[in-house]
Amino acid sequence: QVQLVESGGGLVQAGGSLRLSCAVSGRTFSNYHMGWFRQAPGKERTFVARISWNSGTTWYSDSEKGRFTISRDNANNTVFLQMNSLKPEDTAVYYCAAKVDWSGSYAYWGQGTQVTVSS
């Protein structure tokens, strides 16, 4: 079983930055491709970014491209999401997720961390 624990959320003013972390345990971290998703109040969960097992490929939602950066540290079993130039519409619960197959579904999810951006 794989456990994912997000941290780093909080309250920030518009234009500010936050760095989310997701610590992974239970299996070999480098076996997994990792992703970040978010869910705003009253809305469905949406894709934010993803990164391949060796950091060779990253992919972003159009609305986050240029503002957010996903990265990972396989030595410390952690994936990060650096968020810059935050906007009130970025307010959501952010989740990390793991999968083995790049084209498959995410099999493991964290519990989420709240990000609130004030205007």
Image (spheres, rainbow, N blue to C red):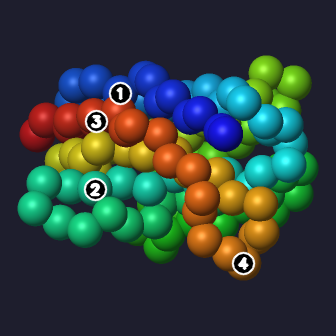
User: At numbered mark 3, what does the secondary structure look like: helix, strand or loop?
Assistant: strand
Image mark for residue 115: 3
Tell me residue 83's x, y (percent): 46, 40
Mark 4 vs 3, N-terminal side: 4
C-alpha span from label 2 to label 1: 13 Å
**Image quarter of residue 52:** bottom right
Q: Which of marks 1 and 4 is nearer the N terminus?
A: 1
Q: How far apart are marks 4 and 3 (CA)?
A: 28 Å
**For the N terminus, which image quadrant?**
top right
For disc 3, the neighbor class at 10 Å (few under 14, some 14 to 19, many from 20) is many
Tell how many labels. Answer: 4
State the mark number for residue 9: 1
Q: Which of marks 1 and 4 is in front?
A: 4
Q: Which of marks 2 and 1 is nearer the N terminus?
A: 1
Tell me how far mark 3 sits from mark 1, CA to CA: 5 Å
Mark 3–mark 2 contact, CB under 8 Å?
no
